[in-house]
Amino acid sequence: MKNIYGLTLSDMEEYFVSIGSKKFHAKQLFDWLYIKRISEFSEASNLSKDLLNKVSEDFSCSKLKIVDIQKDEDVRKYLFELEDGEHIEAVLMLHDFGNSVCVSSQVGCNMGCKFCESGRRKKVRNLEVYEMVLQILMIEEEFGNRISHVVVMGIGEPFDNYDNVMKFFTILNDPFGLAIGARHLTVSTCGVVPKIKEFAKFPLQVNLAISLHAPNNEIRDKIMPINHAYPLEVLMPALKEYYQKTNRRLTFEYVLLEGVNDSEECAKQLAELVKGMNCYINLIPYNETHNIEFKRTKIVQIMRFYDILKKNKLTVTIRKEFGGKISAACGQLRSKKEEL
Ligand code: SAH
């Protein structure tokens, strides 16, 4: 049976029309689901019993199971169990600009980035739309406060589950749904070029982040297998085209790995690579995991790298770290749970 939280407002309108009922019931039901937060269809008291019976024959409104929560001052990490027993994680971060949640888009990931915990474990399946929506709803309910920002940077490659992720954004953005402004939504990809082109046509102004992590093909090939399929000479023009079409500023993420991509020469090459682009570079201190050989770049070297980019007049930030103590890095909690 399908889960109701996977429907966009227009899917739901179509559904009501298809069963010979009225379109406007969709807005009413959205209000019950996303504003009043019912847990049973029968609580939707302005819809008739007959109609609700029909809806509950066709859809479930069951939620996910939260099986673990780890809390720190400014971060909470949630481990969810899905209906088929799989586990995924989401992280709530309390920023001064609002409350942001990092959600997973797949169980596992096939991109195989060498430094990434999720990539070490193969993709089991894509997440359904409702499984992404419920990560947000359930965190809001547990936390007791509104989520203002969402980033799809948890487990998985969102552009390998493109249609579901776009539907997820549509529901989050809908004024009758969670009403989160598109500019507060971000999707991050390792560089799946055909989907970047498709995303340029997506009607909502969702932010795009690119996991770049290397300034040349030689290094990128070694740490990110996707670079064999879409090397920098294919990726970079696609991003420029994306910018021309959308006028939306890009974010480049760059995880600093000691001795791999953190030299001053790398910083100079990176500055050259992104020259002239309207972008923002986010340097990410590597979160070491016990399974992997990569080491975090020391802070002095991070600062050197940062200074070179700054001298080249780039907009750069060093990512604030959340949750080091509580295994909040990509895929770590799931791996702990499953003892892998
Ligand atoms: N697959 C997508 C989104 C998920 S990963 C992508 O590649 O963009 C989110 C970000 O975390 C990516 O930039 C990824 O490279 C980075 N990342 C993965 N493991 C990390 C670690 N151990 N420490 C710091 N960043 C990591």
Image (tube, rainbow, N blue to C red):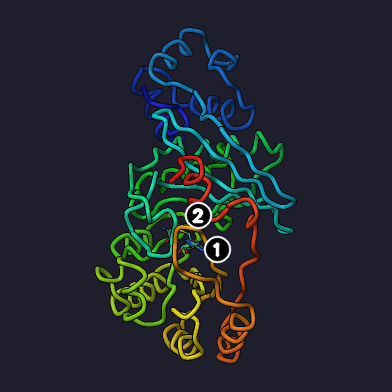
Is ligand 1 closer than 8 angstroms to the Cβ of mark 1?
A: yes
Residue type beneath disc 2: Cys
Cα–Cα gap, marks 1 and 2: 9 Å
* Quadrant occupied by the N terminus: top left
The residue positioned 35% from the left and 75% from the top of the image is 220
Residue lying farthest to the top in this orientation: 50
Q: Determine crowd level at label 1: few under 14, some 14-19, many 20+ residues with C-alpha closer than 10 A.
A: many
Q: Is residue 195 above or below residue 55?
A: below
- Residue 9 in the image, given as x and y percentages of width and height: 46, 35
Q: Which residue is mark 1?
A: 287
- Residue 140 in the image, given as x and y percentages of width and height: 64, 38
Q: Is residue 138 above or below residue 53?
A: below
Circle 1/circle 2 CB separation < 8 Å: yes
Is ligand 1 closer than 8 angstroms to the Cβ of mark 2?
A: yes
Residue type beneath disc 1: Asn
- Residue 18 in the image, given as x and y percentages of width and height: 33, 22
Residue lying farthest to the left in this orientation: 229
In the drawing, does residue 144 fall left or right of residue 206?
right
Q: Is residue 169 visible?
A: no
Q: Which residue is mark 2?
A: 330
